[in-house]
Amino acid sequence: MTQQDRDIVITEVALRDGSHAISHQYTTEQVINVTKALDEANVPYIEVSHGDGLAGSSLQYGLSLTNEMELIEAAVSVCKQSKIGVLLLPGIGTIKDLNEAANLGVRMARIATHVTEADVSAQHIARAKELGLVTVGFLMMSHMAPVKTLVEQAKLMESYGADTVYVVDSAGAMLPYQVKERIQALKQTLGINIGFHGHNNLSLAMANTLAAIEEGATWIDGSVRCLGAGAGNTQTEVLVSVMDRLKIKTGIDVYKMMDLAENIVAPILNAPQEINRDSLVLGYAGVYSSFLLHARRAAQRFGLDSRDILVELGERKVVGGQEDMIVDIAAEIASKRSKVASS
Ligand SMILES: C[C@H](O)CC(=O)C(=O)O
Ligand SMILES: [Mn+2]
């Protein structure tokens, strides 16, 4: 099946975004089993990296159980038709990491920046193009910028050579009308593909994805069994089912996706992916979904309610990469409270 036989191109992100939800503890065996099944289901792109992208394994973001290059190599080795992609956040990952991933047979690079910082992606996008990779610009926390700014930043990524630019609802905070106005504006201005990546914290990932597709987005992310940060992403097997009902061709075998979700991915989860009070607050307060487990750990350490930390993170407009602020804020809240208690 060629790309022309698909109306939308789905990238499966459970082996990257889902890494946040399992504290980056993927084993090579899990990655092989999931990748093989995704390949058999004919998923076009599968993203494999640390949750925070290449070289994310660190005390700040969370140490990976397995070196991501080993996971990438294993995933590439079992693909007959799917292509493996990687995520790279400039400053966390470097050109060297991109080169290494490309040498292992990766076919797509997604270069992610905060929605107002696209200019830091220029050399990574240029290098990905030189390496012959499908190259994607990934504008995180898209809800934080007005439409005009988002368009300007997306244009920068297009000018650097990106084949596709994504609206990324990292916080799962966007409402369908906001998705629509953003995709509409990008469609009117850019000459490249538009993508959408949602999170389900407000139970709107599917509605937002449909809104994006209605406005012309053709590159869409999903995570099987919702295995992504926060409450997870648009659930891939559900997305494929909905697309089948709408007669929008994904090229993906829906029964194979359902079986993979049930038999291979569900056992990987520590707990079912659901919207609980913490993940709901991510969407409600507009907080980066990857902060969830960090905030829970900080809450436990300082004897706080994690929602108080998350709300404060949202008020201070803390963005991806500023994970150190989570502990700072928790310590500050705890210290203020102990002062009040002892006065
Ligand atoms: C590094 C983040 O997890 C990227 C992402 O998937 C998002 O912003 O959402
Ligand atoms: Mn995400």
Image (cartoon, grey):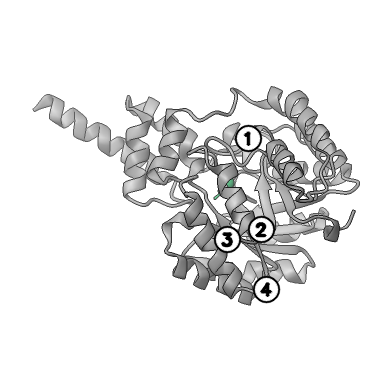
Q: CA distance from mark 4 to mark 1?
A: 31 Å
Q: Position of residue 275 (x, y in %)?
A: 50, 30
Q: Is residue 40 above or below residue 322?
A: above
Q: Mark 4 or 1 closer to N-term?
A: 4
Q: Position of residue 44 (x, y in %)?
A: 80, 50
Mark 3 sits on what residue? 90
Q: CA distance from mark 1 to mark 2?
A: 20 Å
Query: CB under 8 Å between callouts 2 and 4?
Result: no
- Residue 275 shows in this picture: yes
Mark 4 sits on what residue? 161
Query: CB under 8 Å between callouts 1 and 2?
Result: no
Q: Tell us which disc is closer to us: 3 or 2.
A: 2
Q: Quick one: SS at disc 3?
A: loop
Q: Quick one: SS at disc 1?
A: helix
Q: CA distance from mark 3 to mark 1?
A: 26 Å
The residue shown at (26%, 38%) is 332
Mark 2 sits on what residue? 110
